[in-house]
């Protein structure tokens, strides 16, 4: 196995940070001057379309959602709302304990590292400034690719950008979006991060996997032990 491809939210990020998302959306609603409940409903129901780029950039998305909620914000108000929305998104993507150290460890042992994330525009627009960016060789975002997990094209794209075959990849994720089933179907070796230490977050997974991988770890740093005592892929 020459490469490891990670899910993002709830795998590399702090799973409990997802509980902050509703408050972040409420702050954006306030900045836009729209009703909080209407905004929350519009954002959550539009998730499947937003993550494949149908709503465009964050600025375009917020303008569209605000209009759906009965408000047409001016440019200045929209600018403030975009800034607030990005600040809220940053809180939700806080690295989980040990995740960055695990990525650094794997890189020093010659693993190629990839990412497949079902995400909307916020992550793509902020990616280059995150702590994850210099550690991931090939990030693949549903918003840019126009497909969402478990579409096999995402897995194939990640492997190709890493310069490996799917059969040379581990796929590590918390089990949302039927991601492990997708990984298995293209020949990757799936690893479930159970997040057992984070009660209450399992129900936040979108379209949870029905397939349960043979390989399971409770925490991200358990991946080092799973891979074994020798990591030299050189």
Image: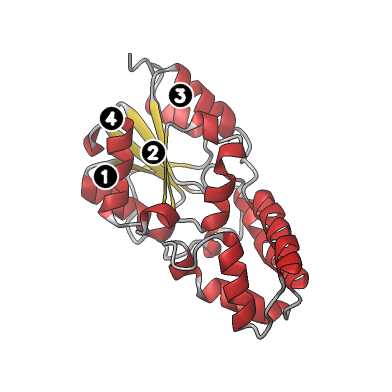
The answer to whether residue 141 is visible is yes
**Label 1's element?**
helix
**Label 3's element?**
helix
**Crowd around label 3: few <14 · some 14–19 · many ≥20 (10 Å):** many
Please tell me in which quadrant of the rendered image residue 148 appears. bottom left
How far apart in space, not on screen, are marks 2 and 1 (Cα)?
A: 11 Å
How far apart in space, not on screen, are marks 3 and 2 (Cα)?
A: 11 Å
Q: Going by the image, does 97 lie left or right of 28?
A: left
Query: Which residue is located at x 52 percent, y 76 percent?
Result: 45
Q: Going by the image, does 84 lie left or right of 135?
A: right
Q: Which residue is mark 4?
A: 163
| Residue 184 % position (x, y) | 26, 48
Q: Which residue is mark 2?
A: 5
How far apart in space, not on screen, are marks 4 and 1 (Cα)?
A: 11 Å
**Crowd around label 1: few <14 · some 14–19 · many ≥20 (10 Å):** some
Query: Which residue is located at x 71 percent, y 53 percent?
Result: 87
Q: Which residue is mark 3?
A: 106
Q: Which residue is mark 1?
A: 156
> In the displayed structure, would residue 232 be above or below residue 4?
above
| Residue 3 % position (x, y) | 34, 30
**Crowd around label 4: few <14 · some 14–19 · many ≥20 (10 Å):** some
């Amino acid at each position: 196995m020459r490469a490891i491809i990670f899910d993002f939210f709830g795998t590399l990020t702090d799973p409990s940070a997802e509980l902050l998302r509703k408050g972040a959306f409420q702050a954006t609603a306030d900045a836009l001057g729209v009703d909080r409940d209407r905004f929350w409903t519009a954002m959550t129901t539009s998730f499947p379309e937003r993550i494949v780029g149908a709503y465009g950039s964050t600025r375009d998305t917020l303008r569209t959602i605000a209009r759906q909620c009965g408000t047409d914000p001016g440019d200045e108000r929209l600018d403030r709302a975009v800034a607030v929305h990005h600040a809220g998104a940053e809180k939700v993507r806080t690295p989980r304990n040990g995740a960055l150290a695990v990525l650094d460890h794997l890189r020093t042992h010659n693993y190629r590292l990839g990412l497949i994330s079902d995400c909307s525009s916020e992550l793509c627009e902020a990616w280059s400034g995150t702590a994850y960016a210099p550690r991931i060789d090939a990030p693949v975002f549903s918003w840019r690719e126009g497909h969402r997990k478990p579409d096999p094209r995402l897995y194939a794209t990640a492997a190709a950008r890493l310069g490996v075959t799917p059969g040379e990849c581990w796929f590590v994720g918390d089990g949302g979006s039927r991601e492990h089933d997708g990984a298995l179907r293209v020949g990757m070796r799936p690893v479930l991060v159970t997040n057992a230490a984070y009660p209450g977050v399992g129900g936040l997974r979108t379209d949870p996997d029905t397939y349960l991988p043979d390989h399971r770890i409770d925490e991200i740093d358990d991946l080092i032990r799973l891979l074994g005592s020798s990591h030299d892929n050189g």
